[in-house]
Image (tube, rainbow, N blue to C red):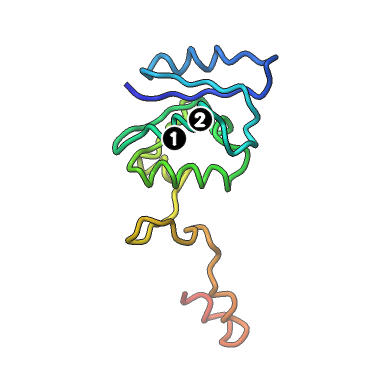
Amino acid sequence: MGLGYGRVSTRDQDPYAQRDRLTAGCGRVYLDTISGALSSRPAFDKVLDAPGAGDVPAFTKLDRLGRSVKMLEQIADRVQGAGAGLRALDQNIDTTTPEGRLFLPSRPRSPNGNATSSPHAPSTAWRRAPAAGPAAARRS
């Protein structure tokens, strides 16, 4: 059984729909009532500290994890660095599959385990184009 994580931003919101959805496939479900913009969320930190190799913590949607692409990338790096994956139930994203890694890729890792530059960094070929002509950029 896996781990599940749900979050609502205010006490006026109901976290139980998320909990019910996660309980169907997770042995333990953690809930937070806290803004997703905060980097430290007590229940979320437990979920991120718990997974080991082969684990796939589940959540209902990507926006329950973070509020920006950068935050999602950092979370994916952290979890995938531990040999685990992430699964968004409502969006059918599982980062242990090739299709899931298209949606939420982690950055390549160096031999010491640290994330290297983003695979989404733009090509530098355009910088060579003015000096060498447009064909130089196309050859890159």
User: Of the residues shown, which amino acid type is indicated by label 1?
Assistant: Leu
Q: Is residue 45 above or below residue 75?
A: above
**Left or right: 129 in relation to 76:** right
Seen in the picture, residue 78 relative to 30 is either above or below; the reply is below
The x and y percentages for residue 24 are 40, 14
Q: Relative to 57, is 84 above or below? A: below
Q: Position of residue 102 (x, y in %)?
A: 45, 46
Using the image as rendered, state which of residue 70 and residue 43 is in the foreground. Answer: 43
Please identify the residue farthest to the left as the structure is shown: 54
| Residue that mark 1 sits on | 48
* Residue at image coords 61%, 22%: 33
Q: Using a 10 Å C-alpha cutoff, classify the residue at mark 2 as few (fewer than 14 neighbours), some (14 to 19) or many (20 or more).
A: many
Residue 96 picture quarter: top left
Secondary structure state at the residue bearing disc 2: helix
Query: Crowding at label 1, few (<14), some or many (≥20) Cα neighbours within 10 Å?
Result: some
Q: Which residue corresponds to the image point at 36% horizontal and 17% vertical from the top-left? A: 27
Q: Say what secondary structure mark 1 lies in.
A: helix
Q: Is residue 8 left or right of residue 120?
A: right
Kindly identify the residue that appears in the image at 58 percent across and 85 percent down.
Answer: 133
Q: Is residue 4 above or below residue 129?
A: above
Instruction: Write down the residue under mark 2.
Output: 44
* Three-letter code, disc 2: Phe
From the viewer's perspective, is 9 left or right of 128? right
Q: Are marks 1 and 2 in contact (CB under 8 Å)?
A: yes
The residues tagged by marks 1 and 2 sit, at their Cα atoms, a distance apart of 6 Å
- Quarter the N terminus occupies: top left
Residue 75: mark: none
On the image, the x and y values in percent for residue 128 come to 56, 81
Q: In the figure, residue 28 lies in which quadrant? A: top left
The residue at 53%/17% (across/down) is 18
